[in-house]
Image (cartoon, rainbow, N blue to C red):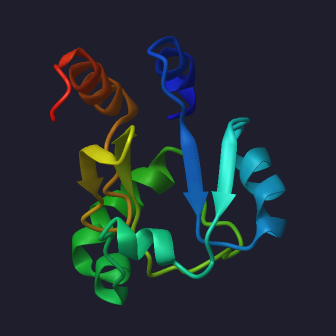
Amino acid sequence: MRGEADRIRELGAELVVIGNGAPRYVAGLRETTGFSGRVLCDPTLASYRAMKLRRSVWRTLGPQNLLHSVRAFARGHRQEKLQGDPWQQGGVLVAMPPNRVAFRFTNAGAGGHMPGQAIVRELEQVLAAPARA
């Protein structure tokens, strides 16, 4: 998403990362990813439950994630120290005022992220669509 942050801002939206680790891990996340935007911390996982994101040992370690692991390793990514809940899967949520979820994507498992360009396309469609009552 780091490469899409400027485009997201151009669209009038804000990219916010919600991590499940403690606030003390934010500096490490910034150093590792280069992300300079807004980072919130939710070690209770309440926001993850509210977004109906999956939490599963099987979805993190299961055989379906072997390809993701091999691909990440081949691209030079290495597992750093564990920060937060390793079993919690992530996702993407596009929220619109006043209280509307315009788009939601749930990671199926570890490494099953939605590409940043696809997220920007979804955001562009949401912003172009007439507001629902």
Q: Quadrant of residue 9?
A: top right
Look at 61% across and 71% down and name the residue there. Answer: 42
**Farthest-out residue, top:** 10
**The one of 93 and 31 positioned closer to us in this rendering:** 93
Q: Quadrant of the C terminus?
A: top left
Above-or-below relation of 13 to 23: above
Question: Could you say where residue 13 lies in the image, as x and y percent from the top left?
Answer: 48, 26
**The one of 35 and 17 positioned closer to us in this rendering:** 17
Look at 15% across and 32% down and name the residue there. Answer: 132
Q: Quadrant of residue 116?
A: top left
Above-or-below relation of 70 to 9: below
Look at 83% across and 54% down and name the residue there. Answer: 27
Question: Could you say where residue 108 lies in the image, as x and y percent from the top left?
Answer: 24, 65
On the rendered structure, is 39 left or right of 91? Answer: right
On the rendered structure, is 92 left or right of 27? Answer: left
Q: Is residue 53 visible?
A: yes
**Farthest-out residue, bottom:** 57
Look at 28% across and 47% down and name the residue there. Answer: 101
Question: Could you say where residue 76 lies in the image, as x and y percent from the top left?
Answer: 57, 47
Tell how many labels: 0
Question: Could you say where residue 112 lies in the image, as x and y percent from the top left?
Answer: 31, 57
